[in-house]
Amino acid sequence: MATLINTTNEALSELQTAPGGGTFNNMLFSRLAQPGWNEGTFGSNSFTNYTWGLGYGNAGGGLDAIYGLSPLAGTNPPFGLSAFRGLQYWFDGSTFDITYRWGNSISPPPPPPPIPPSAYDVLIEFVITDSSLNYSIFGGPNTPPNYQISFNANAGGSIATTQIPGFTPDSFVLPKDVYWIMTVTTDATWWGGGNIELFINGSSVLFSGLAAGTNNFDYTSSGLAGLTNAGGIALEFYVTP
């Protein structure tokens, strides 16, 4: 399990460095504690190091906080070492996880042709981002979106809860708020209509009808942000008639 500051002799430079140690040329605590995760190598690269701060500064008043931290705002927020003690800063598969499951309850089209068997399948592409929808927590700008999860939800099909592809313990920042972008693609010719619902850690953050072709969603335009909990992030995608 990866923790950052959990003893009184932990180096302050750990607040802006890669896991395992490093140096930083300005040890002023208020400077080290401010940047949010999307201001370092995971996001805008305003800082050359990883940034594990309280999300105050260029991050926009604390919108991109790490799980367990309370984001600060204002002209002179009260930074303190106690805010960082004993926190979990990275996804660790033994403690935190990122999982997904899906179900498509629309029945496949009956034979005979011309409607193809795949006419009611749905392609879902999904990424977790920063609050401005510019950067993926899995690394890389979202222009075009850097999708971490992409799968075909075939009509009448489903999968049980599984770990997201490409997951590596201690490699991805653990965000407090789950901001997201999703593209859902249906058959442009044969799609007969249906809905998509997205749950994050058991809470519905999107319910919308699906048109034929490409359907674009994100937490600002059509849904809500989710929240990380003690298990990490559990994503559920459901396609219904």
Image (cartoon, rainbow, N blue to C red):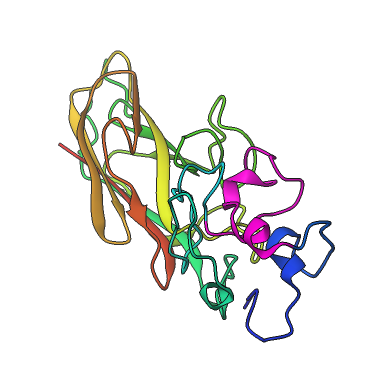
Nearer the observer, 139 or 70:
70
Nearer the observer, 26 or 188:
26
Q: Is residue 38 magenta?
A: yes
Q: Residue at x 72, y 70 (%)?
A: 12
Q: Residue 43 appears in which quarter of the rendering?
A: top right
- Considering the whole magenta stretch, tell me its main secondary structure: loop
Count up the numbered dots.
0
Q: Residue at x 53, y 30 (%)?
A: 145
Query: Left or right: 175 with respect to 33?
Result: left
Query: Left or right: 107 with respect to 66?
Result: left
Nearer the observer, 222 or 58:
58
On the question of residue 159 being in view, the answer is no
Give the quadrant of the N terminus: bottom right
Give the quadrant of the C terminus: top left
Nearer the observer, 85 or 72:
72
x, y (%) of residue 24? Answer: 81, 59
Residues in magenta, as a range: 28-54
- In the displayed image of the protein, which residue is found farthest to the left? 241
Q: Residue at x 49, y 55 (%)?
A: 76
x, y (%) of residue 57? Answer: 55, 46
- In the displayed image of the protein, which residue is found farthest to the front? 76
On the question of residue 80 being in view, the answer is yes
Q: In this picture, is 127 found above or below 22?
A: above
x, y (%) of residue 209? Answer: 19, 30
Q: In this picture, is 80 found above or below 144?
A: below
Q: Residue 222 appears in which quarter of the rendering?
A: top left
x, y (%) of residue 30? Answer: 63, 60
Q: Is residue 11 magenta?
A: no
Query: Left or right: 146 with respect to 198?
Result: right
